[in-house]
Image: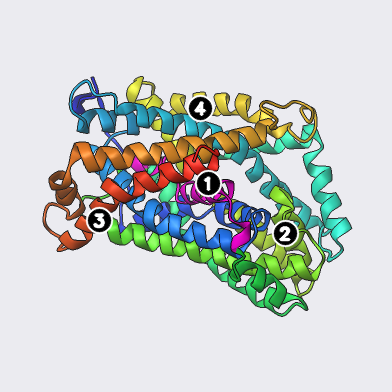
Amino acid sequence: MGQHQHIPKRDGFTSAFGVLAATLGSAVGLGNIWKFPYLTGANGGASFLLVYVLATLLVGLPVMIAEIVLGRQAKANPISALQILAPKRQPWWLIGAAGMLASFLILSFYSEVVAWVFAYVVKALGGTILSSDRKVTEAAFSTLISDPFQSLLWQWVVLAGMGGILLLGVTKGIEALTKKLMPLLFLLLLLLCAVSLSLDKAMEGLAFLFNPDFSKLTGAVMLTALGLAFFKLSIGMGTMMTYGSYFRDDQDIPTTTFRVMSADLCVSLLAGIAIFPAVFTFGFEPSAGPALVFITIPAVFSQIPMGQALMVVFFVLTAIAATGAMLSLMEVPVLIIHERFGLARPKAILLTLALLALTGSSCALTNSSLADFKLFGLSMFDLFDFVSSNIILPAGGIFIALFVGWVWGFEKFNHAVSNGGQLGNQTLARAVFFLLRYVSPLLILAVMLKGFKLL
């Protein structure tokens, strides 16, 4: 079981830039523009940011390298990859199964956030949300999420669109889309930052983002920062192992991952600089939660010439960034169903979409029909987010690090990272391997235990 001959002929990325753009498209999405600002706002600002950056460097980057290396080495889905690479009958394939579960849970709530973005493209075209009055922007968002019909309709439109792109395949679908449109998002974020920094209380916003208050640091805050690092780099959920399986054999994995991580961090900081000066200038709450981006961005655009047109472009590009990340997530269950169960790729895509429409609807209706339904005191939206980001992803990170550090071993890791000795990066390989073997798993475990008040 899980041998090479069972795995069908596969598509793959065609160019080095295509690999970088698609991997960046997975990492840079709504996690940066939506999740990073609202979690930073809800968890005290700069001190949260500092923990997030440390988690990205000491844990996120090594685990990301490990996942991509394992995927490329096996050229298979996450479950089969770990069966191929692990000693016989050892259950390391469960990491891949947990990653598939995490991707499903994330897609269930993430598809609804993407639905809000697409709905906001239409709202931006109508011009009704372009206002610096917080009552106007808050009411517009509240009206959208409390309408069960709109919530479900937009979610299903998004799922159908993603299915269409995935049917085109890896090269024509994922790679082609992300290559063309990612650079535009950077430019628009830079413009937003320039506008935001010209606002009255810009300095208060920047102080909130960059001046740490360590009294705000708790175990729960640290666990949230770690979960965000995993969520934003798309690790612990099978995504990077899946994308790694499409990597070219001559791709320099450490360099690619470092570029992705740097660009990911850069986009997050730009989003923070674009949003927090507006939050303080217009009297919004930094801890406004998932609504933060949707109520502050229209206020920023209301301050500039051609604000409405630029706001339309912003939400279109945000929709595209969200699409890149969502495609990478959907590719995990699609590839596993396709390769493990021998279902044709189009059928695997349709089955995945049907299951997501079912589980996702519970998140779509969280603010309307299911507003009073709670499990463990959390709405389905918050529960799926918490379980995936704070439990499954960090746990997956621990086991990936343990597998590479203690089972696979340095010799195989070094051979894979150096492209069979073609790259002179043995010192880097040793440093990453040391982190994977000793530092990353212990750090993740300590943060998880502290987050759950067990330490």
The residue depicted at 58 percent of the width and 68 percent of the height is 270
- Marks 3/1 in contact by CB < 8 Å: the verdict is no
Q: Is residue 189 visible?
A: yes
Nearer the N terminus, badge 2 or badge 1?
1
Comparing marks 2 and 1, which lies closer to the viewer?
A: 1
The residue depicted at 69 percent of the width and 77 percent of the height is 203
Q: Is residue 306 left or right of residue 78?
A: right
Q: Quadrant of residue 105?
A: top right
Q: Which residues are magenta?
A: 214-242
Q: Secondary structure at mark 3?
A: loop
Residue tagged 1:
223
Q: Secondary structure at mark 1?
A: helix
Q: Is residue 160 visible?
A: no
**Could you tell me residue 245's position as x and y percent?**
30, 41
Residue 251 is tagged as: 3
Image quadrant occupied by the N terminus: top left
